[in-house]
Image: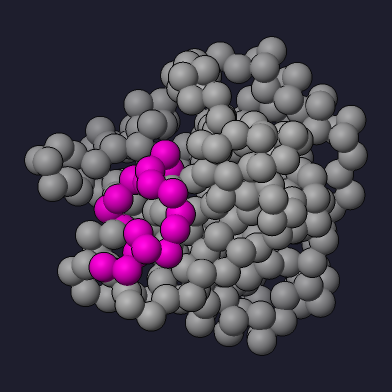
Amino acid sequence: MSSCSIDAIVTQTDIEFYHRHGWWVAPRLFEIEDGQVHKAIDELTRFNTLVDAERARAILAPATRHYNNAGLISPSFRALTHSTVIAAIAAKLVGAGELRIWNTNLVEKVGPYSESHVGWHADRAYWMSCSSEKMITAGIALQDTSMDMGPLRVVDGSHRWVGELADELRRVQGFRGPQPADAALSRYCSDLTVVDLPLSRGQVTFHDCMLVHGSGENRTPLMRRHLITHYQDGTNCWRRCILPDGSVAAYPHDSKVRKTAEGFPDYTDPMYCPVVWLRAAGN
């Protein structure tokens, strides 16, 4: 896709919005049919040999299922998670000359279910082994996602929060944590704005790795599916980070990616972390 085409999708005003608010919603980018989704789910089920732990977790927590490496396992999902269109938009929003895949996930919410929410968290909490804070997440709605289905909820501008409490909040791994209610965040910020992001099928959201977000429960009888791509910019590499409990921060694929000459996880491994966007010379 040419830079002119991307400029037509995301403008300078949109970039400024993203930096101010920490999130942005693209217009509908894809036509996604139910048959495509069912085919991808079938691939994920049949070829799912890399995420047995996640499958077990899905069985234990049936309300919210989290499938790791979805784009690596399913060719049909890979066409979306490795889309150059989405990557080019993400690169423009964060101002990166190169983007690599960090990970891809499929999140399913069974409905109606009272515990199908996703708790407040910032993605950075899971990525403490990364040197970069310039990482970005894109999420594709695989169906029309109404308010009743528990769409993404963001704490507007929370990526710009500073101070010890903000740092503490960004270490909380709340994917299966408390309900995303405003009261849970009151100790961190007394004047916050929570924005719900209902989507049409094929729309894509983007958010900063430091942005606090979550989602509500799926109160409908339908399955709510969200296909997620996490990107790392070209500067990102493994770093030694000691967590409050004294352990060294790690990510699930640290044991799978190749190693650097120093023996550390190599976040440029072309199998797990392929380059999906590289700015052309002179641009």
Residue 1 to residue 175: above or below: below
Q: Quadrant of the N terminus?
A: bottom right
Report the predominant secondary structure element of the magenta stretch.
Answer: loop
Is 246 above or below relative to 191? above
Span shown in magenta: 170-187
Which percent across, then down, holds residue 238?
31, 46
Q: Is residue 181 magenta?
A: yes
Residue drawn where x is 44% and y is 49% of the image:
179
Q: Quadrant of the C terminus?
A: bottom right
In the orientation shown, which residue stands out farthest toward the left?
246
Tell which of 158 and 272 is nearer to you.
Answer: 158
Please name the residue shown 17% across and 46% down the image. 243
In percent of the image, x 18 and y 69: which residue is there? 164
Position in image of residue 239 (x %, y %): 25, 49
x and y percent of residue 230 in the render? 53, 49
Q: Is residue 87 left or right of residue 240?
A: right
- Asked whether 96 or 167 is in front, the reply is 167
Q: Is residue 185 left or right of residue 66?
A: left
